[in-house]
Amino acid sequence: MCEIMKFPVAVQPYTIREEMKQDYLGSLEKVAEIGYHGIELGPPPEGMTIGQQKGHLERLGLQVISAHARIDVLTDGLDALIDYLQEVGGGWIAHSSRFDSKQAVIESAALFNRIGESCRQRGIQFLYHNHNWEFTRYDGEYAYDILLRETDPELVKMELDTYWVKRGGEDPADYLRKLSNRCPLLHIKDMEPGEEQFFAEIGEGVLDFPDIVKAAKEIGTNWLVVEQDGSRRSPFESLEISFTNLRKMGVVE
């Protein structure tokens, strides 16, 4: 893969959620040792200040790029989360929802537009992160496509997830190409072959990552974010395999 296809690569720490509960700093150190450039991270655990967290991350060479947030945080604690991101240098807030009807998608889109405007006013970009349930059809149309249509593309951008698009029955690279200038962060995870469709390390499964990376470059993605919801190995081993394979593909910056 040619030089132009290189990206900075971050980690979504849901991959190492149990390990971080046991050893927060040690887990961050292992992520940095593997070679990752960034991380999606929220405010520090009890007993650690934001300034201390920032100092540790700077020492490790890890950039906080974004934070994921529940809807209650977005409606009742948004300013505090933006304050945090601005202190540590992050630029995005991501959120996931579930919908049980077309009307719920439309109402959520209106709320996301309002949240996106509040974020924009303070220099932060709001993102929507998908799973496979957004590929449920209402009146013949995917919930995801309704969401894309009903949200302002400047206020609500996307953090597409390759595994969940595939799990939803679509080709991740093809779907990514629909999101020109609207997907600054791309969650990358692979899928094992077989009926279980279990999570796999990047390059170890059935997804076409050369084409996915090519599509990401075409549409203006800024960061690739590795996440593996479940692993048959140690989560750190999985993160290392994914990073090594990205390097072999010529993707890692």
Image: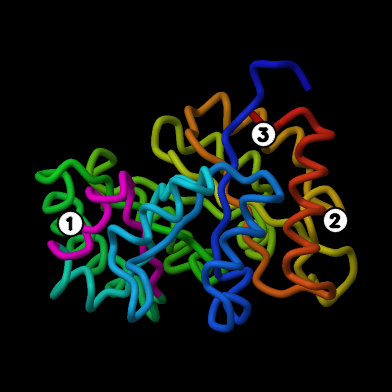
What is the quadrant of the C terminus in the image? top right
Mark 2–mark 3 distance (CA, rounded to whole Å): 15 Å
What is the quadrant of the N terminus in the image? top right
Tell me the number on the disc at residue 205.
2
- Give the x, y percent position of residue 11: 58, 55
| Structural crowding at the residue carrying mark 2, measured as other residues with C-alpha within 10 Å and reported as few (<14), some (14–19) or many (≥20) | some
20 is higher (above) or lower (below) than 211? below
- Give the x, y percent position of residue 147: 35, 57
Which residue is identified by label 3? 213
Disc 1 on helix, strand or loop? Answer: helix
Which residue is nearer to you in this view: 199 or 152?
A: 199
Which residue is nearer to you in this view: 110 or 238?
A: 238
Which residue is identified by label 1? 83
Which residue lies most toward the top here? 3
Q: For the residue marked with disc 1, what is the amino acid?
A: Asp
Q: Residue at x 16, y 65 (%)?
A: 80
Mark 3–mark 1 distance (CA, rounded to whole Å): 32 Å
Report the magenta residues as a range: 79-97
Of the two numbered discs 2 and 3 on the same chain, state the one appearing first in sequence. 2
